Amino acid sequence: MGCTEGDSECDEWESPIHTVEITRPFALMKTEVTQELYEAVMGENPSGFSYGGDWPIENVRWFDTVRFANELSILEGREECYSILEGDSGTEVDWIGFDCKGWRLPTEAEWEYAARGNEDFIYAGSNNVDEVGWFLDNSEYEIHPVGQKEPNGFGLYDMSGNVEEWVWDWQGDYSTENQSDPTGPSTGFNRVARGGCWVLGPRNLRVSRRRGDPYFLGFRLGRSL
């Protein structure tokens, strides 16, 4: 996990490169959550580009993603993975953990593992960013329907570009220690975003790129198996 070999554009936050073991099987949505699905579950569409259909949801707060995950789990008869408490000091979210079989955000490590797709590319599925992602040079300054570019080695679409994606982890430095199933720091100021988006340059679409000042965000959910 961390800066990809041969990538000359890595920043300090992508180091040190370290070994992460994913010990628990999980599934991940093959595309970002669409506006059609989000509206069907939540009854609203907060997107700046309110096109509906297969366009990805964006302009979504992190807290909205965990609420969506719980609501989707309820609709499908699955276990809710988050305890969400609204209080005077703000919203607090507790994750039950990997044993929960309902929908949830991937951890940052799960996201990077999935984005790499068992391949050695700088972007998710290719070293040619135009083949796999919508970004500043080809997007015409707007989002695009999901699944229009080439998938990565795991058959996942748009993990580089289109909309940035929320993950579970708080922003924090990488450890030098090898880890198993890391979930990030216990507290923080910002949640991490991955994947880059339609208004950012190729550097921000790299599979190792991490952002702690995200905007224009969407997401995709996963489930422990």
Image: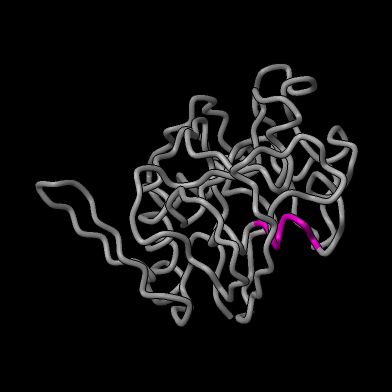
Quadrant including the C terminus: bottom right
Q: Would residue 26 be counted in the magenta stretch?
A: no
The magenta segment = 112-117
Q: Nearer the viewer, residue 69 or 224?
A: 224
Q: Nearer the viewer, residue 217 or 168?
A: 168
Q: Nearer the viewer, residue 89 or 154?
A: 89
Q: Main secondary structure of the magenta part?
A: helix
User: Along the horizontal axis of the image, is 90 left or right of 118?
Assistant: left
User: Along the horizontal axis of the image, is 185 left or right of 8?
Assistant: left
Q: Which residue appears at 75% of the width and 45% of the height?
A: 147
Q: Which residue appears at 86% of the width and 59% of the height?
A: 119
Residue 139: percent from left, percent from top: 74, 23
Residue 56: percent from left, percent from top: 60, 39
User: Along the horizontal axis of the image, is 131 left or right of 28?
Assistant: right
Q: Place residue 52 in its image quadrant.
A: top right
Q: Which residue appears at 69% of the width and 31% of the height?
A: 144
The residue positioned farthest toward the front in the image shown: 176
Q: Which residue appears at 74% of the width and 41% of the height?
A: 206
User: Along the horizontal axis of the image, is 177 left or right of 186?
Assistant: right
- How many numbered marks have been drawn onto this rendered protein structure? 0
Indicate whether 140 appears above or below 127: above
Q: Nearer the viewer, residue 174 or 194?
A: 174
The residue positioned farthest toward the left in the image shown: 88
Quadrant including the N terminus: bottom right
Residue 145: percent from left, percent from top: 69, 36
Residue 36: percent from left, percent from top: 54, 44
